[in-house]
């Protein structure tokens, strides 16, 4: 009994010595590590605040600042050459082209539109315009209004759907840098149909053409917005926030409403590098919107009509 008690005491003493030695060694190691760190002022802000960097795994690699390019009067090579020269002198690096508007009207000379709808072809020849812009190093984002989802019945939808798929393929083959789909009703209920549609469009585009899709302001304000944008990011290259659907509150200006929306949806911009689609407006309001974009660190925007 006495020997057993003596052994227990000896064991406790030895254990305490070992723990003390390990603690001393660990303390010296940690002090050496701390001494090797840069001064506190040199540490990144996210480490100082304890905040982790934003997840940008789904962020688009495309950032443009694209003004709206009217397509009227571009009837020949001379007019196009003059246009491209003025864009180059103005240091324009990207332009926004409305090739199909929200009403479904086509604004270029389209073989698909002529054959399938019998519409009167316009004067704009993409085979003249797009190579000239590309040679000048100007990025082209082609706005494409989607109307098939508003078709009245299944037969009308199928007909319009087939037309849009073929028309998108024609635009992609013409040599645009990007196809921007606008007017798609994105919700939890339509998600499967929308992703199937986007997948079909993407299959018609050359690998060199980026695919972008516009979302309305109410989507990023909804609880389902994060899930829907995550799904869209898996099928597109760029997600764009369409401010044409933004309605200011009573007594609020449009720029003020945009600024409030940016503050509420800042995580979308950091995660997806979301583009802002600006409506055409007067120079004063446009300058105010540009300033708000800059103050919010947004350098990915495009003007559409």
Image (spheres, helix red, strand yellow):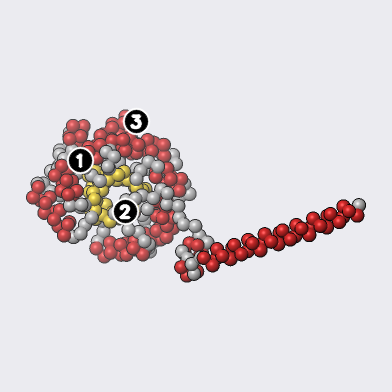
Among numbered discs 3 and 2, the one appearing first in the sequence = 2
Q: Is residue 219 visible?
A: no
Evaluate if marks 2 and 1 touch, with contact meaning CB atoms under 8 Å apart.
no
Question: Residue 89's mark?
Answer: none
Q: Is residue 145 left or right of residue 260?
A: left
Assign a secondary structure to mark 2.
Answer: loop
Label 3 neighbour load within 10 Å: few <14, some 14-19, many 20+ = few
Q: CA distance from mark 3 to mark 1?
A: 30 Å
Dividing the picture into quadrants, the one containing residue 13 is: bottom right
Residue 91 visible in the displayed image: yes
Residue 286 x, y percent position in the rendering: 28, 61
Disc 2 crowd, CA 10 A, few/some/many (<14, 14-19, 20+) = some
**Front label number (3 vs 2):** 2
Expressed as whole percent of the image width and height from the top left, the position of residue 128 reads 13, 44
State the residue position of label 3: 154
The image shows residue 132, relative to residue 298, as above or below, that is above
Indicate which disc residue 63 carries: 2
Residues at marks 2 and 1, CA–CA distance in whole angstroms: 22 Å
Give the left or right position of residue 202, taking residue 105 as reference: right
Residue in view at x 91 percent, y 55 percent: 2
Q: How many marks?
A: 3
Sequence-wise first label, 3 or 1: 3
- Which residue is painted at 15% across and 42% down in the image? 127
- Residue 174 disc label: 1
Q: Nearer the viewer, residue 224 or 47?
A: 47
Task: Tell me the SS state at disc 3.
Answer: helix
């Amino acid at each position: 009994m006495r020997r057993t008690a003596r052994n227990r005491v000896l064991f406790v003493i030895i254990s305490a010595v070992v723990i003390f030695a390990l603690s001393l060694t660990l303390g010296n190691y940690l002090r050496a590590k701390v001494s090797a760190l840069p001064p506190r002022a040199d540490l990144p802000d996210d480490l100082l605040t304890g905040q982790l960097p934003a997840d940008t795994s789904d962020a688009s690699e495309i950032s443009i600042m694209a003004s709206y390019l009217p397509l009227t009067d571009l009837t020949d090579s001379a007019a196009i050459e003059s246009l491209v020269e003025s864009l180059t002198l103005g240091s324009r690096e990207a332009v926004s082209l409305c090739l199909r508007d929200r009403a479904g009207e086509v604004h270029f000379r389209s073989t698909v539109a002529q054959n399938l709808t019998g519409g009167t072809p316009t004067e704009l020849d993409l085979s003249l315009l797009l190579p000239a812009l590309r040679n000048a190093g100007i990025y082209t984002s082609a706005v494409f209004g989607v109307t098939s989802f508003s078709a009245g019945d299944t037969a009308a939808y199928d007909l319009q759907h087939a037309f849009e798929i073929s028309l998108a393929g024609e635009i992609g083959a013409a040599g645009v840098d990007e196809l921007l789909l606008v007017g798609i009703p994105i919700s939890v209920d339509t998600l499967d149909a929308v992703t199937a549609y986007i997948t079909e469009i993407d299959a018609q585009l050359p690998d060199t053409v980026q695919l972008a899709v516009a979302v309305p302001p109410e989507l990023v304000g909804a609880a389902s917005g994060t899930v829907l944008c995550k799904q869209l990011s898996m099928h597109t290259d760029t997600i764009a926030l369409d401010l044409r659907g933004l309605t200011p509150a009573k007594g609020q200006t449009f720029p003020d409403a945009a600024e409030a929306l940016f503050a509420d949806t800042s995580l979308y911009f950091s995660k997806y590098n979301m583009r802002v689609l600006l409506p055409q407006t007067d120079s004063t309001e446009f300058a105010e919107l540009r300033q708000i974009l800059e103050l919010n660190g947004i350098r990915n925007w495009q003007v559409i009509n």
